[in-house]
Amino acid sequence: MKITTIDRRWIFLFILIGVGLPLMLPLGFKLEVTPNVQTVYNLIESTPENKVVLLSFDYDPASKPELHPMAFGIIKHAIDRKQKVACLALWPMGSQMVDDVYQNLKKEMPDIEYGRNFINLGYKAGGIVTIQAMGKNLKNVFPSDANGTPITNYSILNSIHTLKDFAWICSFSAGTPGLKEWIMVAKDKYNIPVTGGTTAVSTPGFLPYLNDQNQLTGLLGGLKNAAEYEFLIQRKGTATAGMDAQSVAHIIIIAFIVLGNVAFFVSKKRKKD
Amino acid sequence: MNHILPLIITFLAGLLMIVSEFIPHKPFERIVSELEIWFMIISGFAIILGQLSLIKMNVLKIQYKSENWKYCVVTLISFFIMLIAGLLWGTQNQGGIIGSGESLIQSIGSKPFDYIFDNIYQHLMASMFSLLAFFIASAAYRAFIARTLESSLLLISAIFVMLGNTSIGTSLTSFLPENLNFLHLPTISAFIMDYPNLAGQRAIMIGAGLGIIGSSLRIILGIERSWLGGKK
C-alpha cells in the first residue's frame, strides 16, 4: 500500500507549512494557565520589594526559542515587582543569553540601571561544586561581574554574602548542570525556594521534584508554559506567537500517526484476506 | 607507584567529602571549601584541554584523510575565526589585544565576535534543534503503530499528552461543564504526566541514584580503575 511507504519529504513539507503559516498569520488559540505556572507567578508576586533574586542561565542558543521567553518574562515580572535581579551562567554561552535578555529588557524598561537592579555575574565552570561554593561565600566564587568589574562596585549585592541571602533562585535549564543541581544544593541543603524553566522534552524528569516538600516551587515546562506566563504578566511575546505554530505542528503529527495506523490495519486486513 | 598514588589521593579526597557532609565543622568545612575552589580552577583548565583535544582530533582526521575529513577543515576554520576575533577585538564590554574595534562596530553594528555569535552561531544552533520537529514527525508516523497492547497504550498516551500540550487541545474541550472537567484534554494530559509518568520517573531516579552511589564507592575504594587509563 502506497501510504505505508510515504516519502518522508511529504511529512517535512506539511510540518514546514504547519509551523510557518501560524508564525506569519497568528491564529490566537485560547490558553489556560496550569497550576505549576501559577505557582511560579505567585512566588514572584509574594516576594517583597528590594529583595535580591538569583537567576541561572543554564542553556545555550539551541534551547533559546523555548527558554528565552521564560527568562525574559520572569525577569520582567521580578523587576516590575521592584525586586533586584542577579544573573549567572553554569553553561559557557549562558552569559551571552543574559546579555541578550538585558538588551531587550532595556528597550522595554529604560529605567533599569545595571548594578542597581540588574547584574550579570557571568559564567563559572564547575557545575554543582560552584553552587556548593556559593553556598559558603558568593564573593569568593564571583569576585567580579561578566565585564570584569568587582561586584563590590555595585550596590545590588551589598546585602548578599551567600546563597541563603537570595529570596528565591530560578534556573533556566537545558541539561546538566542545571535545575537539578540547584535543587540538590540550594533547596535541599540551604532551603531556599527554587523554581525553574526547562525545555518540554526534559520537563517529565523534573515532575518528581514538584512534591509536598516543595523541592521545586512551580515549574515552567516548554513553550506552552512560557506562553501561559506571558499571558499572566499580560505581555504577548515570542512564546505566545510560537504556541500557534507548535499546536498546528502537534496536530499534523497526530494526523500522520492516525494515518499510519489506518494504513497499518488496512494492509493487515488485506494480508489476512 | 604510578597507580597507587592516584588511588590513595582519590580515596582520601572521596572519604573527606563524605565525612564533611556528616561533620560540617572545622577542619573539614575549611578543607572542603578549599577543594571546591580547586575543582572550579581545574574545571576552567578542562575547557582549554577540550579545545586542544578538538584541534588535535581534527588535525589528525585531516592528516589521515579520514571519512568526512572536509568537515574537520570547516570546524578548524570556524574555531580559529572565533578565537582570533575574540582575541583581537574582545567581546561585548571587554576589549581585545588591539582595542575594542570602534571602526568595525560602526560598520557592522557590533564587535566581530558578537556579530558572528548573534547572526550566525545562534541561528545555526536554533536550526539544528528545530530540525528535531521534522524528524520527530517522520519517526512518529512510522513508530507509533498499535501493533500490541503496550504500543497501543503508548500511542493513546502520546496523543493525549500531545493534544494537552497544545492550545488547540484546550480549545477542543473548553465547552465541557465544570463537573466533566476530568474529560478536559489538559486534565487528562496532566493526569498521565502526574501519575503513570511520575511513578516511572521516580523509579528511574532512585535507580540512577543507587547506581551513582555504587559507582562512586567503586572509584573511591579503587575497584573501578578505568579512569587511570583503561588498565584494570
Image: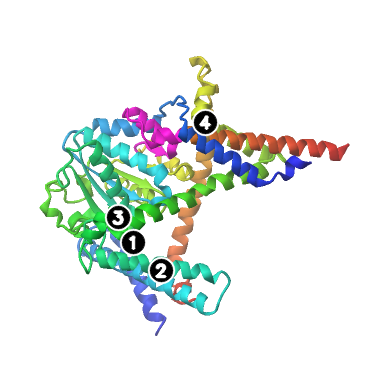
Which of the two discs, 3 and 2, sits closer to the camera?
3
Residue labelled with disc 3: B108
Mark pair 4, 2: CA separation: 46 Å
* Between discs 1 and 3, the one toward the N terminus: 1
- Name the subunit of mark 2: B
Boundaries of the magenta span: A215-243
Secondary element type, mark 2: helix
Do the residues at discs 3 and 4 belong to one chain?
Answer: yes
Q: Rate crowding at label 1 as few (under 14), some (14 to 19) or many (20 or more) other CA atoms within 10 Å.
A: few
Q: Are marks 1 and 2 in contact (CB under 8 Å)?
A: yes
Residue displayed at 65% across by 37% down: A257
Can residue B157 be found in the magenta stretch? no
Mark pair 1, 2: CA separation: 10 Å
Q: Label 1 sits on what residue type? A: Ile
Mark pair 4, 1: CA separation: 44 Å
Mark pair 3, 4: CA separation: 45 Å
